[in-house]
Amino acid sequence: MPDNFFEKVYAAVQKIPCGKVATYGQVARLCGSPRSARAVGYALHLNPLPGVVPCHRVVNREGRLAPAFAFGGQGVQKELLEREGVPCELREGLYYVDLSAYGWRPETI
C-alpha cells in the first residue's frame, strides 16, 4: 500500500479502465482523502509516468476535460480519450465527457 498521497493517487488512477473516466473527487475518495480533489489535480499535473499513469482519464465532476491538460492541453486529452472510445463533446469552447455513459464506477467508492 503506498504511503504518500501522490503514490496513492497514481495507484488509483492506474485502476481506471481504458474507455472510462473518473473524477478528481472519486480519485480523492479512493485515496482515503475525500476532500482532496484539488490535491489529486496537482499530483496528476506532476505525473512522473504519463505513459503508465493515465491521467487523461481524470475529469472534473461535470465531465469537463482540463482546459490546461498538463501534457499538451485539452486537445491532447480529448485525443487520448477518443482513441480509447470515449467521445468528447464541445460546449462553449470546452470539452466534456458524458459521465453517465463513460464514468467509472469502482466497487470501493
Image (tube, grey):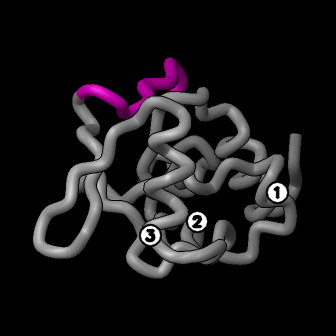
Q: Residue at x 54, y 38 (%)?
A: 83
Q: Quadrant of residue 11?
A: top right
Q: Is 73 located above or below residue 89 in the figure?
A: below
Q: Which label's residue is closer to the chain start, 2 or 1?
A: 1
Farthest residue toward the top? 107
3D distance between C-alphas at marks 3 and 2: 18 Å
Secondary structure predominantly adopted by residues drawn in magenta:
loop
Asked if the residue at tag 1 contacts the one at tag 2, i.e. Cβ–Cβ closer than 8 Å, the answer is: no
Q: Secondary structure at mark 1?
A: helix
Closer-to-camera residue (64/61): 64
The boundaries of the magenta stretch are 101-109
Q: Amino acid at mark 2?
A: Val
Residue 56 placement (x, y as % from top left): 57, 54
Asked if the residue at tag 3 contacts the one at tag 1, i.e. Cβ–Cβ closer than 8 Å, the answer is: no
Mark number displayed over residue 51: none
Residue 26 placement (x, y as % from top left): 46, 46
3D distance between C-alphas at marks 1 and 3: 24 Å
Mark number displayed over residue 74: 3
3D distance between C-alphas at marks 2 and 1: 11 Å
| Residue located beneath label 1 in the image | 7
Q: Nearer the viewer, mark 3 or mark 2?
A: 3
Residue 27 placement (x, y as % from top left): 54, 49
| Residue located beneath label 2 in the image | 40
Q: Secondary structure at mark 2?
A: helix
